[in-house]
Amino acid sequence: MLQVLKSAWALLLGMGLLMIGNGMQGTLLGIRGEIEAFSTFEMSVIVSAYFVGFLGGSRMAPGMIRRVGHVRVFAALASMISAVMILYPTLADPIVWTLGRVLIGFCFSAVYVTAESWLNNAATNETRGQALSLYMIVQTAGIVLAQGLLLTADPSGYVLFVIPSILVSIAITPILLSISPTPAFDTTKPMSLKELFHFSPLGCVGMFLLGGVFSVQFGMSSVYGTQAGMSVAQISTFVSVIFVGAIFTQYPIGWISDRMDRRKLIVIVCGIGATGALIGALFGNDFPMLLLAAFLMGATTNPLYSLLIAHTNDFLDYEDMAAASGGLVFLNGLGAITGPLITGWAMGVFGPSGFWIFAGSLIALLAVYGIYRSTQRPSVAVADTGSFVTMSPSVTPVAVGVAQEIASEEAKEDGAA
């Protein structure tokens, strides 16, 4: 662990600052949108726009890096992120915000691709798993810390937009001054979605549904909070608890997944998440109960991402694991684009509880499909399953590909043993 920190501290510090900036602007826009009298539908389009850009950036970034190099891509896009963050309060218009969110989603995705490839290059075979774990911790911790900064100024002013812009600008300094360009950027030819679905229908369907849930909890939580009449302090606490839940349960669920049928565990975890959504829908006026619901949702949906990847790997050959990463992330991204739009519609029909109704429906649907798939194909013996590698839904195909490589190497070592 110390070796990883020594070689990649600047990158991890910079990414932490970037995640704080991203976490702040994601929550802040939901609060400011209410102040600007944007409708729930307009906010759902704005939230969805981020994931449109993110999906596009993750697919186009490798080509950009090959053309002009990691340093130029990182510096240019980080500067663009900083500029767009200042643009939001200057031009408070739904169309401008939607275009800005597409651009900022594209930029953040490409920046993550660059950083993740840098991190992979800086790590050795022995430390790659530790480096990836630290990266996941930094990502989640950055989002949690961002919520506290929302309490430092009035959301109707400019200060809260200036803070993330400054953080992003500062973030690129230690990275660009301390990290050398990586070698040529290579990508694995992705597996077709048809092939991927053949290997793991549950993995494909689950990643699509989970994309919708994650985009709802990441992008629509603050919109829900304003519709439910929460204060800024309550909204920041509500969003924080979602991601704190993920930190607490990633390791225990991963430990259990290496010791039992993963399809059964997926169904159980989905059941807990759906219960959390039900609590949120029934007790929308009780803030402590809403925090419990937020904790249960975050504690289950984030580990489910890693669980579905591990389950998919159980049906893949070693050499196909990395190739599958692009298809899994693409399906997750498609789900993320549609999630906020349907949530906005549901909140328009059912009120704030539509947030929980839609998220809970997706989680419950995944549980039902998991039960169905259990009747269609025999389970993989626990002794023959691959290792669980902690992942976050906010990463790009680069990080997922690295995780797949780690899982593949561990599977080979277990097979040799």
Image (cartoon, rainbow, N blue to C red):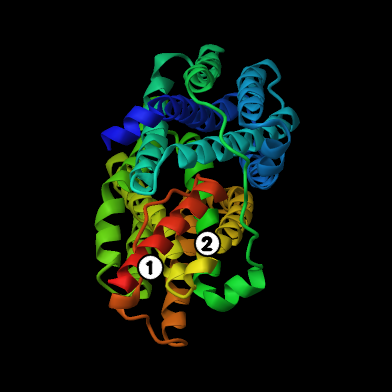
What residue is shown at x 69% (from left), y 39% (from top)? 66
Residue 212 in the image: x percent, y percent? 55, 55
Relative to the observer, which residue lies in front, 250 or 218?
250
Q: Quadrant of residue 268?
A: bottom left
Within 10 Å of disc 2 (Cα), the crowding (few <14, some 14-19, many 20+) is many
| Disc with the residue nearer the chain's start (2 vs 1) | 2
Q: Quadrant of residue 149?
A: top left
Tell me whether the residue at label 2 lies in contact with that at label 1, contact meaning CB atoms closer than 8 angstroms.
Answer: no
Q: CA distance from mark 2 to mark 1?
A: 25 Å
Which residue is under mark 1?
A: 412
| Circle 2: element type | helix
As displayed, is residue 378 above or below residue 390?
Answer: below
Residue 259 in the image: x percent, y percent? 25, 70
Residue type beneath disc 1: Lys
| Circle 1: element type | helix
Q: Is residue 145 left or right of residue 104?
A: left
Image quadrant for the C terminus? Answer: bottom left
Relative to the observer, which residue lies in front, 249 or 31?
249
Inspect this view and state whether residue 147 appears: no
Residue 206 in the image: x percent, y percent? 50, 66
As displayed, is residue 250 above or below residue 158?
Answer: below
As displayed, is residue 364 above or below residue 231?
Answer: below
What residue is shown at x 62% (from left), y 31% (from top)? 70
Residue type beneath disc 2: Met
Which residue is under mark 2?
A: 207
Within 10 Å of disc 1 (Cα), the crowding (few <14, some 14-19, many 20+) is few
